[in-house]
Amino acid sequence: MQRALIATLVVLAGLLQAQFAEVAVRTDVERLKDRERQDLQGLEEAIQQFYISSPWEQDIADLEMYLDVQLVFLSMLTIGNEMYYKAQILFNNRQDQRYFIRDATFPYSPGRSVNLSSAFDPLASLLEFFAYLLIAGELDTYEILAGSPYYTKAASLAVVGQNDSYVGRGWTDRLRLAERLAANQDLRRGKAYFYRAFDILAA
């Protein structure tokens, strides 16, 4: 009972910040062995709680974004004492933002925590990176180039990720993605004008 109460309070704390109002996570583990599938139990909930309960910036506490995360697991390999999973991942805000990763690699084991932290973690930092892209894209619909600080956060995180000896290659691609999105200012300005006009017409 006490654990359930604590879990409920954590969810409510996240909802008060409300950057991500609803998060749905689905996994496809058909390509994995039975033991590997069992070790992934709890991952969907861990990812969902990461987005809903993380202490994101207070100045964006009213975004109330929706997010779908789909993971298709391809294989598992052991590196040192950890199990690393390879997966394809699709992030979708149910509107105008979709990000697809063809080859994501991260360690996971039963009971492993997935928390927002200043220390780099292949899985948590991956989730954080795409949170920043989604937040940046959403803010660009409110004001011209309002998402710039979050594209910068995403790029800075990718720079750190490049130094990881096991997953650095994927982070090089993510750095290019963040920089390309931030640099496309004509599209970003057009996005703000479009949503501004839409709001005027809907009023």
Image: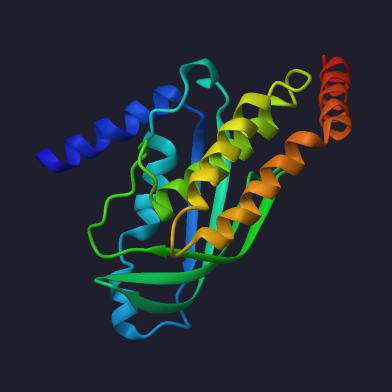
Where is the N terminus found, in terms of image quarters?
Answer: top left
Q: Quadrant of residue 63?
A: top right
Q: Is residue 31 left or right of residue 38?
A: right
Place of residue 158 in the rendered image (x, y in percent of width and height, measured from the top left) = 55, 46
Where is the C terminus found, in terms of image quarters?
Answer: top right
Q: Where 46 falls versus 36 (above or below)?
A: above
Residue shown at 44% from the left, 40% from the top: 51
Is residue 69 visible in this depiction of the protein? yes
Place of residue 163 in the rendered image (x, y in percent of width and height, measured from the top left) = 47, 53
Residue shown at 74% from the left, 35% from the top: 182
Which residue is nearer to you in this view: 97 or 173? 173
Q: Is residue 4 left or right of residue 125?
A: left
What color scheme is it?
A: rainbow
Residue shown at 47% from the left, 22% from the top: 57
Q: How many marks?
A: 0
Q: Quadrant of residue 202?
A: top right
Place of residue 10 in the rendered image (x, y in percent of width and height, measured from the top left) = 28, 33
